[in-house]
Amino acid sequence: MKVLVVGSGGREHALVWKLARSPRVNRLYCAPGNAGTAGLAENVELKAGDVPGLVRFAKQEKIGLVVIGPEEPLCLGLTDELATAGIRAFGPSKAAARLEGDKAFAKHLMQQSSVPTADARIFDKFRDAKTYIASREAGVVVKAAGLAAGKGVIVCDDPADAIMALERIMVHREFGPAGDRVLVEEKLVGTEVSVLAFVDEHTIYLMENTQDHKAAGEGDTGPNTGGMGAYSPTPVPDERTIHQIESEILVPIIDALHTDGVSYCGILYAGLMLTAGGPKVLEFNCRFGDPETQPLLMRLRTDLLDVIEAVQANRLDQITLDWDPRPAMCVVMSSGGYPGPYEVGKEITGLESAATVEDTVVFHAGTRQAGQRILTAGGRVLGVTAMGDTLQAARDRCYQAVDRIQFDGAYCRRDIGAKALAPTR
Ligand code: AMP
Ligand code: GLY
């Protein structure tokens, strides 16, 4: 089968890497891809948001399956357009992807279906939002309602900070039209986890637990990023909480969509805070997480194509996913300055040596090939991912590989997975 993966991040390199291992995939393409995907697939010069271009290419090349990595093409309706052209895609429809693309819609749906989430108010006018924030005493979280590459969420310790955040979003329009509408949320306290599930029309199949590290700085400080590292499995949540997440969060939200005539097929990703009052939703995503996918796919032994086909045939209840019990971890190396302004075009060295560390794969994100050289081309540059008999062993391998890689301004957090290794656990 010919398979096209859409996107260019670490997640997409991991998807390409995993699909390349399927005996039934005989031709792989990645649009637009990066220097890492180029080694396993044919990169196609089409942007992930170029829906007509991607549909044309898929028709022309008689692609059997399109696997859509990022949220942008899903929210633009790539799945729907491909279906109209008779091409199978993996990823929810435009109507279902609103769960991620429109945080106000998602919040309403959660409120309607009693899914536990942070209390929030939604505002279209700067003045109204400002008055509301000024009336609050505790910290709040200000969120642009639209898509902002994981960066349109500003966690604030006090109302004065929150008003500055609101100005950034609604007045300076740092995230463009994504900030036409904002959510002002109560700030939740607890442990954050990502729960990802495969979903077909009848079944929700939870994957192994993962934890992301969203903040740029060590000890979870500094601005939010797309994610600076992840590991799997995680010590929390426990079995009981997982059942609770499934029955009180995932099932009712999918049912609420069904009630509105929308069926959800693909990946559903719930970003959750495990609070003293139980798990609460921070956000829903309609796709694999980045960087959670890197450790998850390294641990998945089952052929990903089999799982995708089971989702498409509504046969998820008939398969069992086989996971490597060994922990895996991904450490993101980013350009200096990310998630703020950063420079690109820096030469990356040491990749070959890093790849020789046992059970390690260096997934590329923002990279590009320039002749024999590989250059940085984005904020998150590499996702160095390793497996080990213990989380500590996986972590040691990750940082051993990280230390062999150099580029000007390279930055990574040194505390990925540290919480899971703390002596209290
Ligand atoms: P989101 O994109 O909505 O998941 O937000 C990005 C990050 O901001 C999350 O991963 C959390 O770390 C943090 N965050 C979002 N909403 C809240 C909240 N209500 N309380 C505390 N932290 C939050
Ligand atoms: N790692 C967070 C996300 O993919 O949204």
Image (cartoon, rainbow, N blue to C red):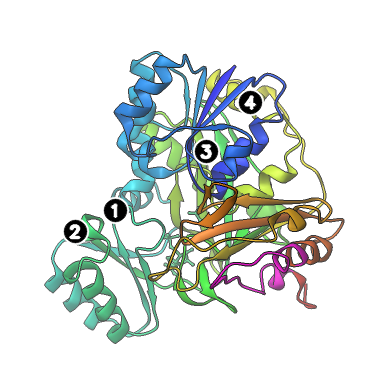
Segment colored magenta:
400-420
Separation of marks 4 and 1 at Cα, in angstroms? 31 Å
Q: Determine whether the residue tagged by mark 4 lies in a helix, strand or loop.
A: helix
Q: Position of residue 266 (x, y in %)?
A: 50, 33
- What crowding class fits label 4: few (fewer than 14 Cα within 10 Å), some (14-19), or many (20 or more)? many
Quarter of the picture containing the N terminus is top right
Mark 3 is on which residue type? Answer: Ile
Q: Which mark is residue 130?
A: none
Residue position for label 4: 305
Are the two marked residues, 3 and 1, in contact with CB atoms closer than 8 angstroms?
no
Mark 1 is on which residue type? Answer: Gly
Query: Magenta region, mostly helix, strand or loop?
Result: loop
Residue position for label 1: 146
Cβ at disc 4 under 8 Å from ligand 2:
no
Mark 4 is on which residue type? Answer: Leu
Residue position for label 3: 267
Q: Determine whether the residue tagged by mark 1 lies in a helix, strand or loop.
A: loop
The front one of 113 and 281 is: 281
Instruction: Say whether disc 2 or disc 3 marks the residue closer to the N-terminus.
Output: 2
Separation of marks 2 and 1 at Cα, in angstroms? 8 Å
Q: Position of residue 145 (x, y in %)?
A: 28, 56
